[in-house]
Amino acid sequence: MTSSVHAYGGGTYAPSSDEVWCAGANGLYRVTEGHVRLMVEDSSSFGDLTIGNGELLAVRETDDGDALVAVSFVGAPVMRVLAETSGFFGAPRPRPGMLAWLRWSERDMPWDASELWVAPYGADGLLGDPVKLAGGPTESVVEPRWGPDAALYFASDRSGWWNLYRWDGESVEPVAPVAAECAAEPWELGYVSYDFLTDGRIVMVVQEGPRHHLAVVDRAGAVTPVKLPYTSIKPYLAVGGASVALVGSSPEVAPQVALVHLGDEPRVEVLARAEHPGLDELAVSTPVELRIPVEGSREVVALVYPPTGAAPDWCAPVIVRAHPGPTASSLVRLDWQAQFFTSRGFAVVDVDYTGSTGYGRAFRQALYGRWGIDDVVDCRAVAEHLLTESRAVPGAVFIRGASAGGYTALHGMTQDGPFAAATAVSAIVDPERWAETVPRFQRAHAARLRGGAGRVRAEDIRRPVLMIHGTADDVATADDVRELADELQDRGVPHELMLLDGVGHYVATSAHAARALEAELAHYRSAMPQWRPADGYTTADGSRCRTYSPSSCTSGSPR
């Protein structure tokens, strides 16, 4: 069962000892011994389901706003509304006699300005007078959770980083200050970036730039990293005793569900793994991290995947990728899309441009009002660095992006520079129009991002573009790319539009993903100049792959 609460879902089920409650298309369901029963019929969207004190708590979203709702397990399953807002709620977290929750306005995103509230919550099922504990216009508060010590824990970016704090009933104090993110950007409800071990310690996921690691916080606040074979960890921790279950991966390890036993010598027990037959024998490209200075005293981090099996002095066609979000980040993990291109002689470069998560609050907000400008500058700086270092072939450097990254890629085609062509998947084209059509949850984000480069205009595009879009996309509607394609056609600008019937915003997870990748590969090959192949090398599937020899590369970029 799934839910479209806040457009991206999250927290759609809550297990207890003998049953599971789920959110579905028609309301709230209970699953007992394999039997599914609709308990509360309601066409609204539900998320952040939580079981506590003999009832189910949840966030309910309608077109008019959010509500905190409760369903008692005693008697008939009648849903009660505890609180309502024209904005948003999140994370209803009960303990005996108290309830905590998050709230943010319709003018804000939860990673910009959100508030943590608590109120008495008695056996009569009514909320008492609420008190705000943290948050406000300049602070994002996420992931509240009652600890075994009866204190309320939460992550706040008041220091510039999402760090862990604790409210003991009287005051708020930091738990483990670090210059890193200890929570994920809350695109979905129900994230669990930290949890409590039975011995009084806290285990948490820490993000530093493109990398994650697991850390343990002792009672004195000392933070100790846990050595694991993972560089990417999902924000869905689950603790049992002195062990924590997680979903982890690395460039060489496909996603695994693992149980990490946190004794004196941490031990990893793999419970389940993504099925990729032959992965152990498959040659993959592993990324190298670059830090490149950019105009305005900025520094941008990029992950460079060399062509698979390439020599240390490789030189190749390069695909620069702008991630979606734009608050997402480029993670160090197994990326099959990157491997598709590196196994065919390309280098792939992921750029953590301005606005990315993993670098603190100021960096995350720096793209507001400059979208389509600074992100493009950052991607261009990375491409020009690779050209200068004779890693990239002049005339064979491309830019691609999905969603917000698609907007970046398209604007990369509106100026002179290193990019010979672009691919834009599920792209946003017109920020002003997008702000009117985007789901309710994301309207504030659209309003804050716009004001930079503005609409992508056909008359400004100078190089070939490929646009891939699902006809059922409800985050960035296909109307804008259709209109842009028509305008490009009228002006005689080389372009292709691939519309995928019935596909939503996530092309990469659709049944058409392979077809989209083949179209993208053909697009780059058609835009590449004449080149002299080297002897090539054998890819993991046994095929021969042509690539550029280092001697054929010279620094510079096409103008």
Image (spheres, grey):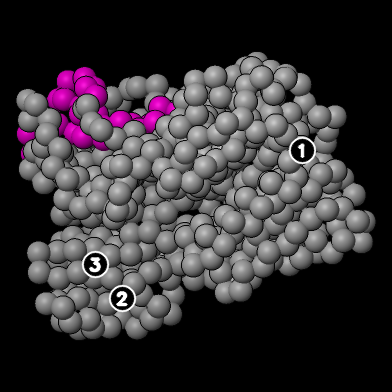
Amino acid type indicated by mark 2: Leu
Q: Where is residue 125 shown, x and y percent of the image?
A: 24, 67
Question: In the rendered view, does 328 fall on the left or right side of 22?
Answer: right
Amino acid type indicated by mark 3: Leu
Kindly report the distance in space between the C-alpha atoms of the residues bearing marks 3 and 1: 61 Å
Q: Where is residue 299 shown, x and y percent of the image?
A: 59, 20
Badge 3 element: strand
Say which label, 3 or 1, has the lower sequence index: 3
Q: Residue at x 22, y 76 (%)?
A: 30
* Label 2: how many Cα within 10 Å (few below 14, some 14–19, many 20+): many
Q: For this rendering, which residue is in front, 71 or 221? A: 221
Is-magenta flag for residue 508?
Answer: no
Q: Where is residue 77 shown, x and y percent of the image?
A: 23, 80
Magenta residues span 198-225
Amino acid type indicated by mark 1: Pro
Name the residue tied to disc 3. 56
Above or below — where is 357 with respect to 76? above
Kindly report the distance in space between the C-alpha atoms of the residues bearing marks 3 and 2: 10 Å
Name the disc covering residue 28, or none. Answer: 2
Residue 542 placement: quadrant: top left
- Asked whether residue 530 is in view, the answer is yes
Q: For this rendering, which residue is in front, 25 or 545? A: 545
Circles 3 and 2, Cβ within 8 Å, touching? The answer is yes
Name the disc covering residue 138, or none. Answer: none
* Label 1: how many Cα within 10 Å (few below 14, some 14–19, many 20+): few
Q: Nearer the viewer, mark 3 or mark 2?
A: 2
